[in-house]
Image (tube, helix red, strand yellow):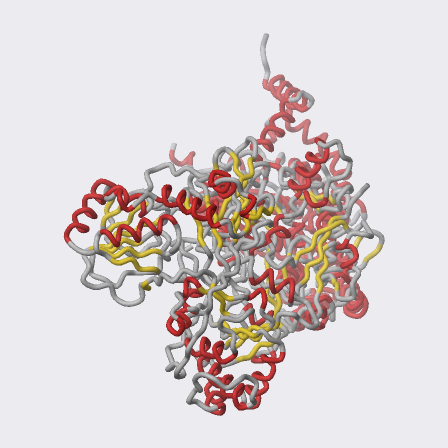
């Protein structure tokens, strides 16, 4: 048979027309669209059952109650625990994305010695050598943990120092430590019982203290109320987030907080609004007015306003003796709604402020904020889960990441009662990590291990029989039958809250404190300890106009 | 019974912390992309800062979380989608976006008066291993499609499953709470059923302090705002603020 | 042998003189280069996604929507000339019909190509046919644009088949003959499709209640922009045809079309432009005084953002509307080639400006009281794909001009486009 060109054309046209009525083109179209929905390079979430665990956040010393959704052995979602009386169901914005931190590209996966990859054995050997050669200093960011005890014990045994990097809230309590002898870590602000707060730039609603504490309190007692039961007078140079929501905003000049405190004290005393006692500032009201940019009358009026609704409490964002002195004059120290003792512990910690000299090595725990750089020429062993860049130590030692370490959490900074909680290691690191405590225990087991110390703390707590356990239910400690039961509750995410401390607190202020350089806590990322931010923080910093560029690497 | 889920956001309580934004992104497997900017990021809920335009001591600011308003009537995005990738769920009133159906023409984005719709300009990507931290049950959206807030519809689904397992017809309202509502530290976002006259949120939406943005367009948005301050409420009524300065993206 | 390679005379109609093949290739070379750059840019957009553009969540439509709306408006000469010739029997316009069809084909196919690059998931474009939302203007646009492109292809084929080499295939001749009988029907269908298509493109923005600058009340389901787009398209289409023809005449150095046809086109363009300007003015007044205030927007607020001030409104309606309408209509100016082309260019600029204002200005303007006025600068990929479409148009037109009868010139054999 001879095939003509015409036959061929007709055949082709017929085939093309016929193809349309077959499923072929439609199936191809369908497949193509399904393929475009499931491109192989699109990550897919894990399948499988979701389990809910309760724990505590270890990003900063506040230890907020954490409800962790787990799938495939990994945390896949975080939220707050409503039954936790300390964090009250809230988390900070960074906390909501913290479960992604462990895969952060800047995760520290290898031991690094001056930028080069090294090994644990080399690091161990180097440290053992240094520790034998001379004194060492150990820096801790969360004092009060079982791990902290290991660090402390080790330092004591090896003739070194144990220093603590305090957060700004604790630093703001330091003047009272000077005047009363009670350590700042045993002090707290009794915000729950105060009615007027004069904030000298403290970012009360913006990451100051426990995220669920003050914002919740404010929401209940002040927000959208015509006559708030909690009045915030915010002195701030610009309209900060707290100023925007405050009952009154005082626009003062940058760095004039101490002058304002002094002016207020003069105004309080001149108008006989407080009983005259203690030191009197040298500066006059008009000098304060000049410095702050407020009028003298405004300062006098302010003095009347703040005492109108007692108890009244002054809060500074960081170390500020003038503001502390104002509290003394106001009678807020040791009083309900003021500065109170959270614990009868009298042990003071030495701060890391200042140079560390004449030591052979410095060990920095992973709880110390990445910003901290030891002012020392000693060999620095720095534990960190993430490499925040611009190396802050000779040795970078990979520490457990978020929820990868079993640890305990003691009283949050500036909290008025003692608390205790435990965070279980819900996630498993895929490479070798060590905590500073474990690393030191390897060298000298007599310093104890965090596990044994945690256990003995629970025993102590059980024996004290004071306080209440907040878990699935609220259980007074008197109803807990054994240490084992207590430990079980704690490992299941319960938090122990102690009773109010009855120990006395009194400050003797002989003379008005000399002006110290004004320090501002500034952005709320300050107490944040990790060297990196959770990737989702990009929503706050890069993908929206909500917040300016953070001080740290994202 | 058909519900009409909606919100009343008390702006006097919002402290602009951004917890809602992060919680929302984590819940819905929204990627954190390094390339994204203010104008190209995926922020199903975004907190905007608004001022009264004054400077100095007279300045006032407030924070407004903006998300899909779930317009009830003449829903602008539903009307324009050429291939029915957007619909208003009759049972819930939630404006649903079907990413598998979307061709990425972005007509809905130009139609939305609230700019509450976001385009996946990039392939969704996470640093190696981080996909293990993704929320199970929420499909990751592919590049080239539009997405937006669906009031954490997956949580509604879970609540329904729970109710069905317990042989109940109605879900327990406490089982269905969107991530942003749950995350808000000051409880500024109130979520509920506007169709239920006894629902506290329905009552709150009728308060004289409540208002809706661009309500005058007649689209019946189901997200209400609330404020005691008149200048904030005026935002609903004022025209585009006369700010001729040009912002470069 | 070499000389045979370098000549294409067999493909050129007998009796037509065309420039040498090498000169023609030289002419094509830069356009081809531009097209290749465009194709590369398009590839980047398809492969990496639309992050290659500078569009963003608020400027969700960028340069491409302006390009689409613009070239489709200019391409309106095709359907409108067909409409005039076949439906209204204005046979005197027949000589430019082929050019009109080719220009229309270029504009529409270019628009579809750009559209496919600028959607996020082009593989799913067919969903619109499978799950159409009949309430969406974009559905109407998609159906009309694809159907009309099909019609234009069918209209283009007979022109293609007039190539001397293709004519040698007997089956093509039969096909050609059959197709020719269909052409008037196609022209009618095309006219209807294109009317709707132009209209629905106008409706695209006119229905956007959430964009008060673009939103218009209307008649039945169509906002006023629906009708304004049709009017402005058919007004500027003939002007664009004049510009194209004049450009070809200039480049080839030949007289291709009788002055009479130019004047006829000018009159059509001018009168329609006049009607459009009147309608647009009424529409603007209604929008300023009724539509916008009733939605709660003070209309002058839309004009406070530089450079989108009221001068743009003036330019759109008076400078590039009323003025060319006069110039095109009056014999004194329309019979002078310089004035005529200037007026035609102004008319085209007017319709482009209208499309620009409706798309770009609409998106730049804030709607929420705390929105900012936004600026957007297209990325090189967007500009390159835009330029690629223009290069594609020039190439297709050049090839068509060289190998196909584009103008029913004085030589009788090319005048019969109805096919006998």
Of residue A139 and residue A528, the one placed in the foreground of this image is A139
Reply above or below: C240 against C316.
Answer: above
Question: Which image quarter holds the C terminus of chain A?
Answer: bottom left
Residue at image coords 78%, 64%: C295
Q: How many marks?
A: 0
Of residue A288 and residue C291, the one placed in the foreground of this image is A288
Residue at image coords 41%, 83%: A512
Q: Quadrant of residue A309?
A: bottom right
Of residue A150 and residue B61, the one placed in the foreground of this image is A150
Residue at the far right: name it.
Answer: C220
Q: Quadrant of residue C142?
A: top right
Residue at the far top: name it.
Answer: A1
In the image, taking residue C26 as reference, residue C298 lies left or right, namely right
Question: Which image quarter holds the N terminus of chain A?
Answer: top right
Where is residue A48? Give x, y as percent. Answer: 55, 30
Where is residue A356? Give x, y as percent. Answer: 24, 63
Where is residue A464? Give x, y as percent. Answer: 47, 50
Q: Is residue C359 visible?
A: yes
Q: Is residue C401 visible?
A: no
Reply above or below: A281 against A354.
Answer: below
Of residue A388 and residue A316, the one placed in the foreground of this image is A316
Residue at the far left: name it.
Answer: A133
Where is residue C345? Give x, y as percent. Answer: 63, 62
In the image, taking residue B126 as reference, residue B170 lies left or right, namely right
In the image, taking residue C415 as reference, residue A436 lies left or right, namely left
């Amino acid at each position: 048979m001879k095939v003509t060109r015409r036959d061929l054309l007709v055949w082709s046209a017929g085939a093309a027309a016929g193809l349309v009525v077959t499923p072929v083109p439609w199936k191809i179209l369908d497949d193509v669209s399904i393929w475009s929905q499931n491109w192989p390079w699109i990550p897919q979430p894990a399948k499988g059952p979701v389990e809910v665990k309760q724990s505590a956040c270890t990003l900063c010393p506040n230890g907020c109650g954490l409800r962790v959704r787990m799938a495939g052995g990994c945390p896949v979602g975080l939220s707050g625990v409503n039954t936790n009386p300390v964090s009250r169901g809230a988390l900070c914005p960074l906390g909501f994305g913290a479960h992604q931190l462990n895969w952060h590209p800047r995760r520290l996966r290898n031991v690094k010695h001056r930028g080069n990859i090294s090994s644990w054995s080399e690091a161990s050997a180097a440290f053992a050598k240094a520790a034998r050669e001379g004194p060492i200093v150990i820096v801790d960011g969360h004092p009060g943990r079982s791990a902290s005890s290991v660090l402390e014990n080790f330092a004591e045994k090896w003739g070194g120092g144990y220093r603590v990097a305090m957060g700004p809230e604790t630093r703001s309590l330091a003047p009272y430590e000077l005047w009363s002898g009670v350590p700042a870590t045993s002090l707290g602000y009794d915000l729950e019982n105060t009615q007027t707060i004069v904030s000298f730039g403290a970012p009360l609603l913006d990451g100051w203290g426990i995220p669920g504490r003050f914002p919740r309190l404010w929401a209940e007692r002040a927000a959208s109320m015509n006559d708030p039961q909690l009045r915030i007078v915010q002195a701030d140079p610009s309209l900060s987030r707290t100023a925007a929501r405050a009952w009154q905003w005082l626009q003062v000049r940058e760095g004039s907080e101490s002058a304002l405190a002094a002016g207020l004290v003069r105004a309080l005393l001149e108008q006989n609004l407080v009983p005259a006692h203690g030191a009197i500032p040298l500066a006059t009201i008009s000098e304060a007015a000049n410095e702050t940019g407020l009028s003298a009358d405004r300062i006098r009026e302010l003095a009347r306003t703040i005492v109108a609704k007692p108890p009244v409490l002054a809060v500074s964002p960081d170390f500020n003796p003038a503001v502390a002195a104002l509290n003394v004059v106001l009678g807020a120290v040791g009083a309900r709604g003021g500065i109170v003792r959270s614990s009868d512990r009298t042990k003071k910690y030495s701060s890391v402020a200042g140079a560390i000299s004449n030591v052979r090595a410095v060990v920095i725990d992973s709880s110390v904020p990445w910003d901290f750089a030891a002012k020392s020429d000693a060999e620095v062993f720095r534990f960190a889960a993430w490499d925040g860049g611009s190396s802050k130590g000779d040795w970078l030692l990979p520490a457990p990441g978020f929820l990868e370490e079993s640890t305990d959490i003691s009283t949050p900074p500036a909290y008025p009662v003692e608390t205790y909680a435990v965070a279980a290691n819900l996630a498993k690191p895929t490479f070798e990590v060590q905590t500073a405590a474990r690393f030191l225990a390897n060298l000298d087991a007599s310093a104890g291990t965090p596990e044994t110390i945690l256990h003995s703390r629970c025993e102590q707590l059980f024996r004290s029989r004071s306080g209440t356990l907040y878990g699935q239910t609220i259980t007074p400690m008197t109803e807990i039958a054994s240490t084992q039961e207590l430990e079980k509750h704690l490992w299941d995410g319960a938090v122990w809250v102690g009773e109010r401390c009855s120990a006395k607190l009194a400050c003797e202020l002989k003379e008005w404190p000399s002006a110290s350089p004004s320090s501002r806590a500034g952005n709320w990322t300050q107490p944040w300890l990790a060297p990196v931010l959770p990737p989702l923080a990009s929503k706050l910093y890069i993908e929206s106009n909500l917040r300016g560029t953070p001080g740290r690497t994202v | 019974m058909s519900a009409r889920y909606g919100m009343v956001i008390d702006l006097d309580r919002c402290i602009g912390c951004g917890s809602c934004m992060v919680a929302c992104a984590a819940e819905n497997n929204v990627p954190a992309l390094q390339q994204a900017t203010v104008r190209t990021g995926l922020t199903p809920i975004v907190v905007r800062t608004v001022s009264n335009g004054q400077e100095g001591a007279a300045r006032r600011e407030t924070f407004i979380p903006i998300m899909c308003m779930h317009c009830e009537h003449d829903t602008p995005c539903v009307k324009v989608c050429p291939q029915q990738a957007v619909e208003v769920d009759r049972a819930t009133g939630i404006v649903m976006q079907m990413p598998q159906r979307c061709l990425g023409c972005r007509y809905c984005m130009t139609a939305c008066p609230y700019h509450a719709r976001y385009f996946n300009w990039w392939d969704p990507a996470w640093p190696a291993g981080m996909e293990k931290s993704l929320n199970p049950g929420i499909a990751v959206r592919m590049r080239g499609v539009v997405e937006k807030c669906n009031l954490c519809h997956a949580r509604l689904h879970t609540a329904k499953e729970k109710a069905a397992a317990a042989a109940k017809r109605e879900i327990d309202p406490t089982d269905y709470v969107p991530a942003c509502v749950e995350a808000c530290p000051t409880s500024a976002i109130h979520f509920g059923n506007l169709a239920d006259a006894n629902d506290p949120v329905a009552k709150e939406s009728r308060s004289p302090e409540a208002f809706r943005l661009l309500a005058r367009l007649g689209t019946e948005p189901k997200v209400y705002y609330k404020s005691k301050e008149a200048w904030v409420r005026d935002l609903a009524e004022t025209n585009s603020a006369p700010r001729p300065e040009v912002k470069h993206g | 042998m070499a000389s045979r390679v370098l000549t294409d005379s067999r493909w050129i109609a007998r009796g037509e003189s065309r420039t040498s093949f090498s000169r023609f290739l030289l002419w094509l070379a830069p356009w081809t280069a531009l097209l290749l750059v465009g194709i590369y840019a398009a590839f980047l957009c398809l492969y990496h996604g639309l992050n290659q553009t500078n569009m963003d969540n608020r400027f969700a439509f960028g340069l491409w929507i302006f390009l689409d709306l613009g070239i489709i408006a200019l391409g309106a000469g095709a359907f409108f000339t067909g409409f005039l010739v076949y439906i209204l029997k204005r046979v005197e316009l027949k000589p430019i019909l082929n050019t009109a069809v080719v220009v229309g084909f270029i504009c529409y196919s270019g628009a579809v190509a750009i559209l496919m690059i600028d959607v996020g998931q082009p593989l799913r474009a067919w969903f619109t046919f499978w799950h159409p939302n009949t309430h969406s203007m974009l559905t109407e646009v998609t159906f009309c644009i694809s159907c009309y492109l099909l019609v234009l292809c069918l209209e283009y084929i007979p022109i293609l088949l007039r190539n001397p080499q293709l004519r040698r295939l007997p089956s093509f001749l039969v096909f050609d003959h059959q197709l020719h009988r269909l052409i008037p029907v196609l022209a009618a269908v095309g006219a209807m499709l294109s009317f709707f298509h132009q209209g629905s493109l106008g409706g695209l923005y006119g229905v956007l209640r959430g964009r008060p600058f673009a939103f218009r009340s209307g008649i039945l389901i169509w906002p006023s922009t629906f009708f304004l787009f049709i009017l402005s398209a058919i007004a500027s289409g003939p002007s664009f045809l004049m510009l194209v023809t004049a450009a070809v005449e200039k480049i080839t150095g030949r007289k291709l079309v009788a002055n009479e046809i130019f004047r006829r086109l000018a009159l059509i363009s001018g009168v329609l432009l006049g009607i459009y300007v009147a309608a647009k003015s009424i529409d603007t007044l209604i929008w300023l005084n009724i539509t916008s205030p009733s939605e709660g927007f003070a209309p002058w607020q839309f004009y406070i953002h530089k450079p989108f001030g009221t001068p743009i409104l003036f330019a759109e309606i008076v400078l590039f509307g009323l003025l060319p309408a006069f110039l095109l209509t009056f014999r004194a100016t329309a019979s002078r080639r310089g004035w005529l082309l200037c007026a035609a260019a102004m008319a085209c600029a007017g319709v482009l400006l209208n499309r620009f204002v409706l798309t770009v200005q609409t998106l730049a303007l804030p709607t929420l009281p705390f929105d900012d006025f936004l600026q957007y600068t297209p990325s090189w990929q967007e500009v390159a794909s835009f330029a690629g479409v223009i290069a594609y148009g020039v190439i297709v037109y050049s090839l068509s001009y060289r190998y196909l009868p584009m103008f029913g010139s004085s030589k009788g054999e090319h005048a019969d486009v109805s096919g006998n």
